[in-house]
Image (cartoon, rainbow, N blue to C red):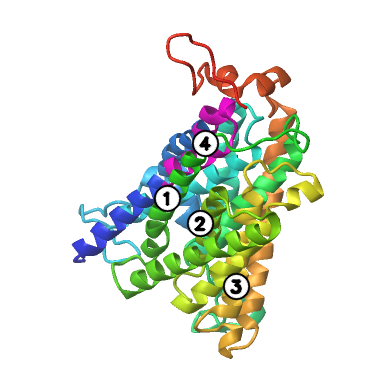
Amino acid sequence: MEFDTGAAAWMLMSASLVLLMTPGLAFFYGGMVRSRSVLNMMMMSFGAMAVIGVIYVLWGWSMSYGSTVLGLFGNPFDQFGLVGTIQDDTGAWLPGVGAYPQIIDVAFQVTFAIITTALISGAIADRVKFGSWMLFVPLWVTLAYFPMAHMVWGGGLLSGSEDGIAAKIFGVVDEAAAVAPVDFAGGTVVHINAGIAGLVLALLIGKRKGFGTEPMRPHNLPFVMLGAALLWFGWFGFNAGSAFAADGAAGLAWVNTTSATAAAILGWLLVEKIRDGHATSLGAASGIVAGLVAITPAAGVLNPVTSLILGAVSGACCAMAVGLKYRFGYDDSLDVVGVHLVGGLVGTVGIGFLASEGGLFFGDGVKLLVIQVVIALVAILVSAIVTGVIGFGIKKTIGWRVSEEAEVGGIDLAEHGEQAYETIGSGRVIREA
């Protein structure tokens, strides 16, 4: 097969952009926590990069895209260590999804696994052992992320396969579901999956000391803004790269991503202004992420105008949703639930209303909407159960929480033997206000 070097270059660049998102997330989350926890927060993202970068090569790709086991996950031994993934017996490169070698697909997909898992860390900031997080990462990505990727993108139960749930509901046409679910770049696989995992862990681990009674403001808003900028930049690889070619579909995804994100900023800031009297920098940064999350599953099936609608709705909904933790008493430290779970649901279900083909508002009936709701609910259920089992197991063995002394005095020093901020010369730590 003759490969397109332009497509190969585009996908390698997209993979690099998505990989950049995780250090961007480290800045975003690092700025949102208190100064005594910033290094720990950033290390959770870098730790996820390290662990998943290893196990994806060993069994992650195979579990995501190997031969199916009951439509739930790929056989981990099918392509263990990427055997049979890179070249054939003659030494020729095996083809990928697009007009490029399959090894580039591996490069692209590992970055999704990394960022998805790292997202969860924001829900449990300021209170967990680094070692417990580093145990959770390989367990969760193996038992939750890889199976979800297989179910949605690898031909499993949540795909358009003739054996999938969608085919069972509305039948089969030409050996595929008559009404196929849409997840262009990761609404269910990434955001709903990580969002519900964050909620389960926040409930299981419990609240930070002083939650609801002490101020827990972001210690470095410029870090937050920088992180949001890096996430937005990297997200073009996330969404436009999911077209698997440098073509019109990638261009549409790029424009839709920008449109939805811009509208989400405005939607979030409008809610803030009406509710609180101020449009904040934290709100603008959070609105960026809310828009990016919502457009992720829909980037290839909406037009730029409907993307504006989806983004504005997501920005407003997420701005309101981040306050639910105070009403219901769960401590989602950095609003993973309010932004990623809610934004992921808005985007996934919104496809059923706004998709240019199949959307309710375009006169195509409710079938796609029904399918989108079903796959979102199944994703929530699967992720919640798996995360609950893993989280409970860690809680009952090595435990999740640092000591009260470490939590109050600073996780950075207790867990890593370092502190982010010290006065020059005296060695005295600069305390938070």
Disc number placed over residue 288 in the picture, else none: 2
Q: Percent position (x, y) of residue 309?
A: 55, 74
Q: What residue type is labelled 1?
A: Ala
Q: Percent position (x, y) of residue 229?
A: 42, 50
Q: Considering only vertical position in the picture, is 348 above or below 334?
A: below
Q: Percent position (x, y) of residue 81?
A: 39, 42
Q: Can residue 150 be seen in this view?
A: no
Sequence-first disc among 3 and 1: 1
Left or right of 423 in this view: 69 = right
Residue indicated by mark 1 = 229
Eye-nearest disc, 3 or 1: 1
Q: Considering only vertical position in the picture, is 231 above or below 408?
A: below
Depth order, front residue of 220/317:
220
Left or right of 67 in this view: 394 = right
Q: Which amino acid does label 3 sit on?
A: Gly
Q: Which residue lies furthest to the right in this view?
A: 328
Residue indicated by mark 4 = 220
